Amino acid sequence: MKRYLLFFFLLFFSIAVFAQDTKAKREIYVSAYLDQAEQKNAKGGNVADLSVHNTVKYDQPHVTLPDRSELPQEATQGKPAVIEEKRGGFVIHSPFESSVSNFDFGPTAKTIQGYSTYRTEFSGDVKISDTPPVTITVPGASELRFPISGYFGGGQIAWYQTLRDQERHNLIRATLDWYTHAVGSRGRMRDSDWFGPPIDDGGRDIYSESRVGLSGYGLDGRLAYNAFSLGDTVFTGPILGIKYEKFQFKCSDLEQIGNGLFAPSFTMTSAGPSLDYTVQFTIPYLGWGADICFDDQYTLKLAGGYSFLTDVRDRDDHLLRSKLSLSHTQGSAAFAEAKLSWDIDKHWQVSSSLQYLYISTSGHQIQQYYDGSTSDKTSVNDQIKSTQLAIDAGLTYKF
């Protein structure tokens, strides 16, 4: 078996060397002909009188020489022919340059690991005992941390405007990626409460954990304009996009511990549903990207972006307390990503990407019980934050 493998390897290597040698000699042949055509023209002769077979000094028994009629028209009219024009150095490109359009689409698989938290700070009445009834008014803080952990399936579609003289230069690229949660949610929701003063003194007055089931989906639409190029390998330019995500967490099987004065009333366990939480992120962003082409098959796409108009809304339904909390916060977000693509052939491409996303917003929360009465907490300030690390793999078909 090893001898067959060695044989096929040597055969493949010989074919590759033979093909490369043919290409190299063909380039020498064309160069030699053009040199002699230019010399003939400089002496006042007619380039058309040149015999391709007689003037080339290089032996090419395996090269099929082109007929004179197949040569560029300029060569038969006494002008040096230009076979191909390549750009070099730093170039600024216009969106109206000569180009062709392409589309591609295909499926993707994604995993996201991270969390989303919301933290409220308030002052209000807290009931610490029912018999006898004891209520105190204190400042406080509550922080709930929800795990974003699971596998998503989706797809991507893109439109490219590619320059004619640089086939790998996507001058303008519009992409749409979407994903929805499939399987594999894991992790536990953690709820911490502090009552002060001081707040966050190192210990939690009430702490609970719940099992979490995650569902959700996301969209990311992006327009990139690679207006600048450096040679034939680096293309870079601005990015404009919008990202939307919605995650739903169903929490159950509560395990809660109260400390100090809160131990008698707040230490408990509860089987079944305890809390439903939904959060949605809307992130319009500006950024910068770069495409780095290593050879005819591999491309590394780098991108980073920032949003100062990030909008986050959430809905916290405390089932055990019959209380509904609604928040609207605004702030900023930033991301960085890298994507490696491999062109298998002119139609099929596989890719893998890594993205880190950070969100930080602040605003106000409204709390209301099911019966319509307001919460005993007033002046509720809210902060919603999220950190996500996403890894995906995709297969696309270009047409």
Image (tube, grey):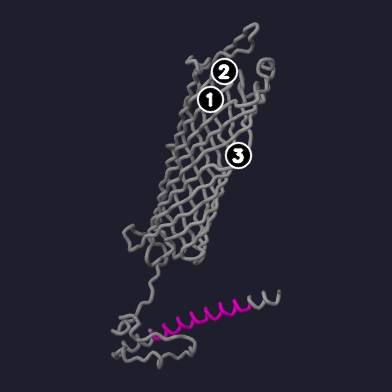
Badge 3 or badge 2: first in the primary sequence: 2
- Mark 1 Cα within 10 Å, few/some/many (few <14, many 20+)? many
Q: Quadrant of residue 170?
A: bottom left
Q: Is residue 209 above or below residue 241?
A: above
Residue type marked 3: Ser
Residue type marked 2: Pro
> Which-is-in-front pick, marks 2 and 1?
1
Question: Which mark is on residue 250?
Answer: none
Location of mark 1 (residue): 317
Q: Depth check: 1 or 27 in front?
A: 1
- Mark 3 Cα within 10 Å, few/some/many (few <14, many 20+)? many
Magenta stretch bounds:
9-33
As measured in the structure, the alpha-carbon distance from the residue carrying label 2 to the one carrying label 1 is 23 Å
- Mark 2 Cα within 10 Å, few/some/many (few <14, many 20+)? some
Q: Depth check: 252 or 54 in front?
A: 252
Residue 191 picture location, percent across and down: 61, 27
Residue 75 picture location, percent across and down: 32, 83
Spot the residue most to the front.
Answer: 272
Q: What SS does tag 1 mark? A: strand
Residue type marked 1: Asp
Location of mark 3 (residue): 185
Question: Which mark is on residue 139?
Answer: 2
> Which-is-in-front pick, marks 3 and 2?
3
